[in-house]
Amino acid sequence: MKLLGQLLIWGSLAVGAMSAATAYLVSLDLPDDELVGLRLAAPPESKRETDRHVVPLAENSAKITPQLLAKLRESGTRNIRVREFRCRRWRGRWWFGLSMLGLIAGALLTRWGARPQQAGPTAGDAPGDPQPVLHAIVREVQQLRSQLPSMPHRDEQLDSIVQRVGQLQKAHLANLVDAREPLVARLGLAGYAVLMDHFAAAERQLNRAWSAAVDGALDEAVACLDEAAVQLEQTQESLGPAGIDEPPAR
């Protein structure tokens, strides 16, 4: 039961992260009245096989017009990334909803499977204590945000976001998910769900920051880092008085 819960949580996090990454990606198959007036979040590129070079078809933040739509469709572009979010344009919304249900179901299964072991040490003393893990994530995000303005070149800023957020994705983010048992023991199922809601939102923003940096959209990447910092602070608050110490303000 416990293993099934763990697999369900991991699978739900993966599905949720992938679907969240498409929240601002819209299909050009939508009617013109759904697209005209939106602003691009990243410059679309011509990807026809006949093109020798990948050429941007519009500037970042350009307003979508019927003429631009015709040009994009003619070029073979199938999807564009926009700044405005609307749920009905989000193709991954059903997958994201299923991933949230999967997280709740996985937490229930994990708690039921862990019941015989809950009479041992307190959550704060247990192996895999989430406090230092969350502290490390918050510290790394805060340091990255504070250091970006001092970097003289745009490419240096983008590379730093890609590398350091990538390291967070591989190490600390997964480690906090591994600490679910002490979290459930400390907070109960309802408190765990609240904490994971904030943490999942922070993880989505970090994934978006990495993706935007890879695409060269520095402003969007920085905005996502700022939002991730807010969600991480709320994750800390969800731990309650026994939570970790706040890192120094930048």
Image (cartoon, rainbow, N blue to C red):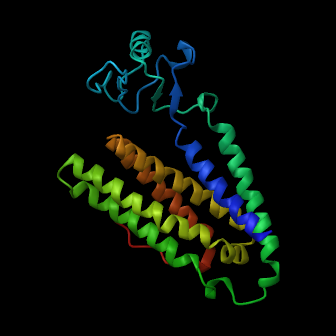
Name the quadrant of the C terminus: bottom left
Q: Residue at x 56, y 53 (%)?
A: 201
User: Which residue sits furthest front?
Assistant: 49
- Residue at image point 52% right, 56% down: 202
* Residue 46 appearing in the image: yes
Q: Is 79 placed above or below 244 here?
A: above
**Residue 233 in the image: x percent, y percent?**
51, 64
How many discs mark residues in the rendered view? 0
**Left or right: 122 in relation to 216:** right
Q: Residue at x 60, y 84 (%)?
A: 127
Q: Is residue 232 above or below residue 92?
A: below
Q: Name the spot of residue 219 as percent of width and height, x first.
A: 34, 42
Query: Horizontal placement of 24 versus 159: left or right?
Result: right
> Which x, y percent locates residue 232?
51, 62
Percent from the top left, x then y, of residue 235?
A: 57, 64
For residue 211, side relative to residue 190 (left or right): left
Which quadrant of the figure contains the N terminus? bottom right
Please tell me which residue lies in front, 201 or 96. Answer: 96
Q: Residue at x 32, y 44 (%)?
A: 218
| Snapshot quadrant of residue 180 | bottom right
Q: Nearer the viewer, residue 249 or 38?
A: 38
Residue 190, can we see it? no
Q: Quadrant of residue 61?
A: top left
In the displayed structure, 47 sits above or below 103; it is: above
In this rendering, the answer to whether 159 lies above or below 38 is: below
